[in-house]
Image (cartoon, grey):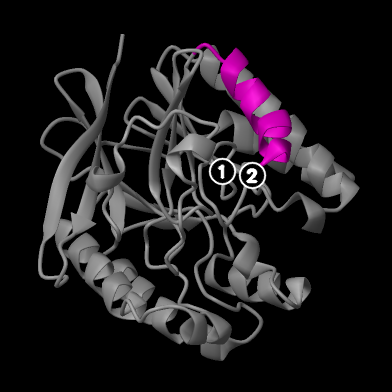
Amino acid sequence: MIRNFKLSILLSVCVFTSLAIADNKNGLIFISDIQEPLWVERFTSKNEYNEKASDSLFSNISRTKPEAVFMLGDLVGQAINDYNWIDFDRRIQVLRKSRIPVYAIPGNHEYMFLGGEGEKNFRKRFPNLQINGFSRVFDSIGIVMLNSNFSYLTHADFESQQQFYAKLLDSMDNDVKIRSIIVCCHHSPYTNSNVVGSSSEVQKNFVKLFLKSKKAHLFLSGHSHHLEHFVHTSKHFLVIGGGGGQKQALKKAEFRKWKDKILDNEKPRFFYMLMNIENNKLIIKSMGLNQDFTKLISKEILSLPLD
């Protein structure tokens, strides 16, 4: 069993799924925090028609026909029973019928209340994914997906994911076919949210290795239900938790620890991110819903040269 486990780790590091996202393709989509509000949130907050917003986002994703969709956790409000997955299953079925690959990592809502049952339901939807770290390569872009729910990982799971992550970054850094690496997890290492804090565990366990990697240029996360953009040592951190979750307040400007490159009045409420390669650059755009959910407003957030 140990031998098979080591072999699977080696294969995860050395064997990549490679698809095209080059010019004139439909790109990759990243979305996070699509969970419906919890019952207590419905009583304490204004109705924003969150489920309708998520449906509209996924309808647009389906029409876009991207090369793949990556979801960064909090797929449902409570993952402990199948009933709470009905809307999610309906949305994903449409994508899979269109042969759009869908990848995901769990968020904290996948472990809420009864973590073991929630994880089982997550695994039922993604039986072929390694829940504690996996990677894919599209064109020349390496994408690393990591589980940041550290309190629910066994010591062995935590250690194996750290080893996988370190070996994978080293492998991608030395692979001439890889020009840029994107690291993804659910919990944000940096956020100005007044509801959820910046994760010091993600900073320690994921960001340190990310900063050391010569090709890792972009770190994506969710958990905070905002679009935020931070720059640290010339590397970019995007918070993309706009898939439909309950509205969260940002800290007042004078109490914010991190300098956000996106002004408050420029932040879309419900959105996903579209990534493509254009003119030898990695272009990241936010695709935000207008107020009546009838169309998407595209805005370029980041352009990274691919040297």
* Residue 3 horizontal/vertical position (percent): 85, 41
Q: Is residue 37 magenta?
A: no
Asked whether residue 95 is in view, the answer is yes
* Residue at 33% in and 51% down: 68
Q: Does the magenta stretch include residue 204?
A: yes
Indicate the amino acid at tag 2: Gly
* Residue at 65% in and 55% down: 131
Query: Dividing the picture into quarters, in which one does residue 123 lie?
Result: bottom right
> Quick one: SS at disc 1?
loop
User: Foreground: 47 or 289?
Assistant: 47
* Residue 221 horizontal/vertical position (percent): 50, 44
Instruction: Provide the major secondary structure of the magenta segment.
Output: helix
User: Foreground: 261 or 300?
Assistant: 261
Q: In which quarter of the image is the C terminus?
A: top left
Side of 70 relative to 10 (left or right): left
> Quick one: SS at disc 2?
loop
Query: Dividing the picture into quarters, in which one does residue 295 lie?
Result: bottom left
User: Foreground: 80 or 17?
Assistant: 80
Q: What segment carries the magenta color?
A: 199-214
| Residue designated by label 1 | 188
Cβ–Cβ under 8 Å for marks 1 and 2: no
Indicate the amino acid at tag 1: Ser
**Which of the numbered marks, if any, corresponds to residue 133?**
2
Query: Dividing the picture into quarters, in which one does residue 209 lie?
Result: top right
| Image: 165 above or below 40 | above
* Residue 287 horizontal/vertical position (percent): 21, 51
Label 1 to label 2, Cα distance in Å? 16 Å
| Image: 212 above or below 273 | above
* Residue at 56% in and 55% down: 105
Q: Residues within 10 Å of mark 2 (few under 14, many from 20)?
A: many
